[in-house]
Image (cartoon, rainbow, N blue to C red):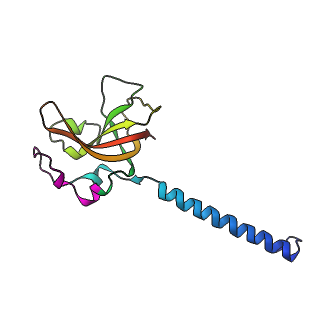
Amino acid sequence: MNFGLSRPTSLRLNLVLVLLVSSWSLSAGRAAADDPNVISFDDVKFPMELNDDFERSLLTAEVTALADQRIRIRGFIRPSVKQSGIQQFILVRDNLECCFGPGAMLYDCMIVRLAPEQSTEVTTRPITVEGTFFIKEFKGPDGHVWAIYNLKDAVVR
């Protein structure tokens, strides 16, 4: 079907169409490569018993491979005194504040630092956070490691 177009014009239009589709496919491929890794708290588990001291050697290859990668994860904001304009918070696996109650595991939380100009509010609903994942131990006043996972330059989706 040439819609009344001459053969050379029809060929040029087909060529333009092929080039447009090809360039769209290439740019779509680049966007997909920039998409964050979608993970869950199950993906960052490692073999550790309750009350064991943390050692970096416990981390799995899959967990360490996430370092310096953009990730997207779903969880809950651990409530704090501040309710709005929050730029840093702790993301926990579930709304029972698992990471700070009895039976909590070290891999069940992440310290989230939002990107500049970003903020959020406390909510009881699950949220999705996207940011750059890194591993850095945070020790509490008791000298024990309380958190190891961090997200920087994050946004709440």
Q: Is residue 80 magenta?
A: no
* Outermost left residue: 52
Q: Vertically, is 53 above or below 142?
A: below
Q: Vertically, is 46 above or below 19?
A: above
Percent of width and height locating residue 11 = 80, 74
Percent of width and height locating residue 128 = 41, 43
What quarter of the picture does the N terminus occupy? bottom right
- Marks counted in the figure total 0
* Outermost top residue: 81
Closer to the camera in the image, 49 or 34: 34
Closer to the camera in the image, 114 or 121: 114
The residue located at (32%, 52%) in the rendering is 67
Percent of width and height locating residue 106 = 20, 44
Report the side of 65 relative to 87 (left or right): left
Q: Vertically, is 7 above or below 16?
A: below
The residue located at (23%, 52%) in the rendering is 45
The residue located at (88%, 74%) in the rendering is 6
Closer to the camera in the image, 99 or 86: 86
The residue located at (15%, 42%) in the rendering is 103
Q: Which residues are magenta?
A: 48-64
Report the side of 142 relative to 132 (left or right): left
**Which image quarter: residue 138?**
top left
